[in-house]
Image (spheres, grey):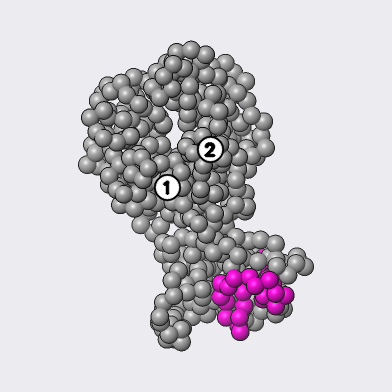
Amino acid sequence: MRPRRICSALMAWAALVAALLLPSPAHAAAPESPAVSYSNPLVNQRADPHIFKHTDGFYYYTATVPEYDRIILRRATTIQGLSAAPETVIWTKHATGEMGAHIWAPEIHFIDGKWYVYFAAGRADDVWKIRMYVLESSAANPLTGGWTEKGRIATPMDSFSLDATTFVVNGTRYLSWAQQDPKISNNSNIYISRLANPWTITGTPVRLSMPTYGWETVGYKVNEGPAVIQRGGKVFMTYSASATDSNYCLGMLTASASANLLDPAAWSKSPMPVFASNAATGQYGPGHNSFTTSEDGKSDVLVYHDRNYKDISGDPLNDPNRRTRVQKVYWNADGTPNFGIPVADGATPQRLSSYNYPGHYLRHWDYRAKLEANVTNLADSQFRTVSGLAGSGTVSLESANFPGHYLRARNGEVWVDRNDGSTAFADSASFYRRPGLADAAGVSFEAYRFPGQYLRHYGFLLHVQPVAGTLASQDATFYQQ
């Protein structure tokens, strides 16, 4: 959000004219994907997180532990509940030989009535001879059942390989993973193959991506950690790139679900990272993600790790403080996922959509609050609802990408301003959260400092004004998403 040298009066006039020329707004239905609320970090000192939502009503969680010596599981009926859920060690590294070191990146899946954990491991006598392995359990509860080692996932190249994940598209189950090709001067590429069974690939693996962009080759030339999410007939595969410090980030491949996913030409690669470090929110090196869904099944959730500091002493792999975090995935009008930025620690932010202008969201632009459609800079339209700066049962709305900045009334207009610590600021940035004036399923915000005046849009700009009449009530009603 950089200053735009445009006269604010002209902008306001243009917005008002545009509003008058638009047809009467439609009334939005309650959103199909309502707001979710989590608190970050979810689990400290757990990297490469994977959360699987099962039909038994539980979320199952596994991740890399800093000691790299065991595989753990947790389960809870809610995503947030995983934070305090008891942790069970289901498998420990071998004392000698294969699977004796560097136990990395476990994933848990339920396939054909059995549980499977995919993971990577080195040898006790050669810790960097890392390959992919599979565990199997037929127990209903994988935390208490026994596990059988199904062995190594064999690939045509006997080389450094890790980060196996599995997914189904149109009835076909695939495996995707990262592997080093000895003929290519980099650390790892992304591959895909069909599966004959959960631990055996079939056919010739295909390389989908290799690190070529500058942001994929900082520190190390890496494409690793694939994860798949599907929507609207498209398959999106995120992956992690660069060294595992603050340069770690997510890239993304996209293919049509009806295409031949074993044809590299069917996939397009985003030229820029889709999720990266953010100094404003204090989040560094986000990566090695997975996806799950919210408790009501209506929202997609991004699961990933990062650190809350940039500078690391020594090898990042020896730093234990990668934390598991979660936040909602939003979807752009063109059907692509929008991950936004790694949000600040604490409560996750939400969006506020207009009751009477469907698809329009409250956002800031040059620090002015306004209503706009197709906000692809997601964080501009995300606000965290926190305890009101003025107290007295109020709430304040904090900007997601400018922590410490809040929506506040200034001469009847609404701006995003930095909290200066004054009582006047606290009063102007505090609201009473009320049931939506036009729809009780929505929300309206009554100004603490100006009783009877509400946050509302007019000419697509946000104001704090008295509300009288049906249209004004609709202008002052929002849905949390």
- Residue 292 point in image, percent of width and height: 50, 41
- Residue 113 point in image, percent of width and height: 49, 22
Q: Quadrant of residue 432?
A: bottom right
Left/right of residue 401 with respect to residue 173 in the rendered view: right
Which residue is at the front of the view, 306 or 384? 306
Left/right of residue 348 with respect to residue 371 in the rendered view: right
The residue pinned by badge 1 equals 247
Residue 265 in sight in this render = yes
Q: How far apart are the alpha carbons under marks 1 and 2? A: 15 Å
Residue at 68% over, 71% down = 421
In the rendered structure, does residue 252 fall within the stretch colored magenta? no
Magenta-highlighted residues: 407-435
Above or below, comparing residue 99 to residue 377 in the picture: above
Residue at 70% over, 74% down = 422
Residue type at numbered disc 2: Asp
Residue 439 in sight in this render = no
Q: In which quarter of the image is residue 178?
A: top left
Image quarter of the C terminus: bottom right
Above or below, comparing residue 129 to residue 10 in the picture: above
Residue at 57% over, 54% down = 344
Residue at 33% over, 30% down = 179
Point out the residue furthest to the right here. 392
The residue pinned by badge 2 equals 319
Point out the residue furthest to the top here. 96
Answer with mark 1 or mark 2, whichever residue precedes in sequence.
1
- Residue 132 point in image, percent of width and height: 40, 23
Left/right of residue 215 with respect to residue 280 in the rendered view: left
What kind of element bears circle 1? loop
Residue type at numbered disc 1: Asn
